[in-house]
Amino acid sequence: MTSAAVSVAPTEADPFLVLAGIRKAYPGVVALSGFSMQVRPGEVIGLVGENGAGKSTLMKILGGVVAPEAGTITIDGVEQPALSVADSMRAGIAFVHQELNLFDNLDVAANVYIGREPRTGGLFNIVDTGRQRQLVAPLLKRLGANFSPATPVAALSLAQRQMVEIAKALSMNARLVILDEPTSSLPLSETAKLLDVIAALKADGIAVIFISHRLNEIEQSADRVVVLRDGKLAGTLDKAEIEHDRMVKLMIGRDLKAQTSAPANPPGAVAMSVVGVRTGSFPAQQVSLELRNGEILGLAGLVGSGRTELARTMFGIDPIFGGHFELAGARFLPTHASQAVARGVFLVPEDRKGEGVLLDLPIAQNISLPNMADNARGLLVAGDKENATAEIQRRNLGIKAPSVATRAGALSGGNQQKVVLAKWLAMEPRVIIFDEPTRGIDVGAKSEIYRLMRALSDSGVAVLMISSDMEEVMGVSDRIAVMHEGRISGFLSRDQFTEENVLLLAVGKSLKSGARA
Amino acid sequence: MNKKDLGLLILIIVVGAVVTLMNSRFLLPVNIANTANLVGMFGLSALGQAFVIITGGIELSVGSMIALVGVLFVDFIANHNIPWPVAVLLMLLLAVVVGLFHGLLITKLKMQPFVVTLCGLLFYRGIARFYTQDSTAGFAFGQSFPDLEFLTAGRFYGVPNSFIALLILSAIMWVVLHRSVFGRYLYAVGKNEEAARFSGIKTWQVIVAAYVICQLLTIVSAIYFAMYTRSISPSSHGNFYELYAIAAAVLGGFSLKGGEGSIIGALLGVVLLQELQNLVILVGIPSSLNFAVMGGVILIGVLVDQQWSSFRDRRRILEAAKTNAPARPESTPAQ
């Protein structure tokens, strides 16, 4: 992604930020120990590691929020044991967090200068909106933004909003911009835009630390990769060494088997079909597709292309505005999730904490919730049945928890996702829809989720997987459907799986010769 | 009984002991029986409120419904010669209708519980006053309903029957809330309605049922209040009773965000509130300070409870830090 103009060797400049022997422990956890790294101007550093590897702690130390217990931080040759928030800002360290801190109701310029607005002076001394916009315009230009300082933030896409955050960093003379998982909720085309912005920052001599679980993006953009594992530096890879498998090996300390998995059997009969369905978000468009037993159908597309709405409609959460579903040949028009659940159509939702698990309830109660009929005697809950059911699922899925009485909220993201899956596996699934099943889940747990999906599919269940992660879509699916603005823009069979094809369909173009759409 | 309930029980005993030291009449059977009667009546409406609060909702029309049912019930049996069992059934039917009405407005038409039931508070009070032309509803001289009076205002071996009714209904409601599938759904809906819906639970039915249960228990308490006072002035009867019920639930460990609380907790909350009322009288605090005492105690109670649990969390983390075992605090510190 880096443009040709930027071929400055990263080793030329001296590092302006040096961390040496950093250690930080929390009660019961050593978050970081003996960690050292250097940051040079204009360098793009990929920072990878599983959840819990110490990335967040490192960010907090750089931001001056947390003080390390040992080690030194040297900025421009001045050595100090810890940074304050003010030190960090003075040194030009800026953060773009996963959750953006923008005001939807204000325009771009106002967001960039929030809290330090230029004033008109004089009697009223009000905000000088005109000057504010003039100041922001060149920043946006530097980033290659295609929107104006006067655009309301509410009208911007997620990647554009990230640009606003980065513009804010530039306005404060940032020398190091830290991007924390910027692409995890970005659709494919937007990701490319963000990588261009990173290249633009690099060209300006600004250093970037890019944290991501998506290793192919790191491969494309980083000059150097720093891998953290269990709070320690697991290794550093130089430009030439940056390679997917090597990063994974360093992250988890072992080789990960290839993520692509082939189905055990050829796809079976049609389990569920979507026939000319119209959803609330794109009522003018119709969607038709077929889910087959024993097949994993990947559903790719941009965020906002109507994939989640389709899943919600199939599951009876959102109302259907035309067309119908067919389940084993019979018409199926769910008006409530309970009807989908009763027919064996299950959804593992995108928003795990909001819609998937009840964080305050024990694992066992989460698993039994949709199926109280089998976990009750008459009108009363049968705790013994409930625990037995949950125990079986805990063992089958390898949910890492002391017992099924553990609160779901105490589990890691990957294990929470397994609890969501367990509640459906404890029943009899015919169709399972996964909406972004591995978002925010670390590499080890990801591959376990993939294995479970494949096992489900091989047992004859029809699987629909919505994913914005290119690697995941191409690695896991047997067939890919791509959505664009509420319609299916094309299907890809395994021999047509290329990033280019998925992207073409996702932006609504048709495939090049020899491909069916 | 969890630690929270135990703490509340100890507080009740300590306050009781202090009041006894200051005025030994506290332990006289007549005082205990009177307080038990009030606990019984207020407890019934607090139980109802508890079910609504569990779902994250609120029912503000309780006091007005107590007034409306009071005037209707007394008028039916005193002036229209409707047999009292029939009148009771009619009142329960009214409870179901009102509960359904509130519940459906909240779930199907997506109105906020506070708004719906606030309008109910105004509406039912207005209807009650209109029904009697703002005059007091009561019984004629010498008019008597021995069976009804025994069941409501009577005593069984010295124990007020209202209190016995509360014990019986609490036992039933305990099973419903803590042991039944419906109770499980109530907690699930209260903790995270979306996640419950995504598990295939008909959350709207659960919420509507909670409002119906609330109205049913409220109306039972309304009949007790009516037979206890025997004369119902529609503009003042039952004023603020919804707030007593909410206060008891909050004191008993319920969270207004929903998903938290127990029947035992609600009952202990009611007992503590009534004990405080009793304290004001017995210790000789000016009765005009009644509300001030209640407000102060509830504020301190909830404050201590929350500070205590965050203190416990911190202590657990510190202990885990000493032993070097992996900590499992409520909020994981790193990453």
Image: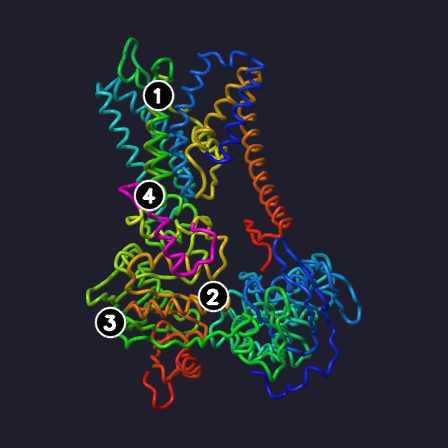
Q: Depth check: B16 or B206 in front?
A: B16
Residue type, mark 1 in image: Ala
Q: Position of residue A431 (x, y in %)?
A: 30, 65
> What secondary structure is marked by label 1?
helix
The tag earlier along the polypeptide, 4 or 2, is 4
Q: CA distance from mark 2 to mark 1?
A: 62 Å
- Is disc 2 on the same chain as disc 3? yes
Image marks 1 and 4: residues in contact by CB distance under 8 Å: no
Q: Which mark is residue A381?
A: 4
Q: Chain of mark 2?
A: A
Does the stretch in magenta take in A379? Answer: yes
Q: Earlier in the sequence, mark 3 or mark 2?
A: 3
Q: Please check whether the numbered discs 3 and 4 fall on a single chain.
A: yes
Quick one: SS at disc 3? strand
Which residue is identified by label 1? Answer: B226
Q: Which residue is mark 2?
A: A445
User: Mark 3 = which residue?
Assistant: A270
